[in-house]
Image (spheres, grey):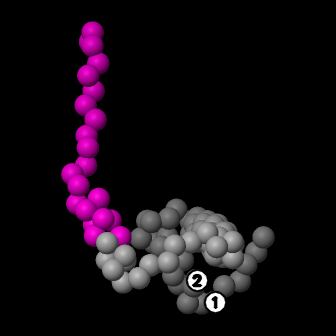
Amino acid sequence: MTLSIPTELEEFVAERVASGEYPSPEAVVSAGIQLLKERDKQRDALRQDIDAAIQQIENGDYFEYDEASLDEFFAELQAKLNQPKQTIHNTSVGQ
């Protein structure tokens, strides 16, 4: 496959190769395509989450919060975030 790209992008590709970040122009283009694929995958997952949320709302499966209950919710969330992380100790015997 042969591609033509604008001069600005060609310069960008050449800079990446010259810096040693990528071994070839093909590697730069390949990395860009991989990023596009990942972005599309993330966008599709987000769309699925949004569709699921809309369905929950349409089914009445949601909570309504007033200012006081939101304050309580965020206080509980902050308390969980402030708890020290638990560490797991290896207690293997017979080593």
Q: Which mark is residue 42?
A: none
Say whether marks 1 and 2 touch (CB < 8 Å).
yes
Which residue is depicted at the point 51% across and 73% down?
A: 63
Task: Inspect the image, locate mark 1, and give the three-letter code of the amino acid beneath it.
Answer: Pro
* Magenta span: 73-95
Q: Along the line of sight, which residue is nearer the eye, 56 or 82? A: 56
Q: Which residue lies furthest to the bottom in this view?
A: 7
Q: Does the magenta stretch include residue 65?
A: no
**Residue 35 location in percent, x, y?**
58, 69
> Marks 1 and 2, how far apart in space?
6 Å
Q: Circle 2 — which element?
A: helix
**Residue 9 location in percent, x, y?**
57, 85
Q: Mark 1 points at which residue?
A: 6
Is 65 on the left or on the right of 52, as rendered? left
Q: Along the line of sight, which residue is nearer the eye, 53 or 19? A: 53
Answer few, some or many: residues within 10 Å of disc 1's Cα (few below 14, many 20 plus, some between 14 and 19): few
Which residue is depicted at the point 29% across and 18% down?
A: 92
Task: Inspect the image, locate mark 2, and give the three-letter code of the amino acid beneath it.
Answer: Glu
Residue 90 to residue 22: above or below: above
Q: Residue furthest right?
A: 1
Image quadrant occupied by the C terminus: top left
Residue 11 to residue 51: above or below: below
Q: Mark 2 points at which residue?
A: 10
Q: Does the magenta stretch include residue 80?
A: yes
Rendered image quadrant of residue 2: bottom right
**Residue 16 location in percent, x, y?**
47, 73
Q: Along the line of sight, which residue is nearer the eye, 52 or 4? A: 52
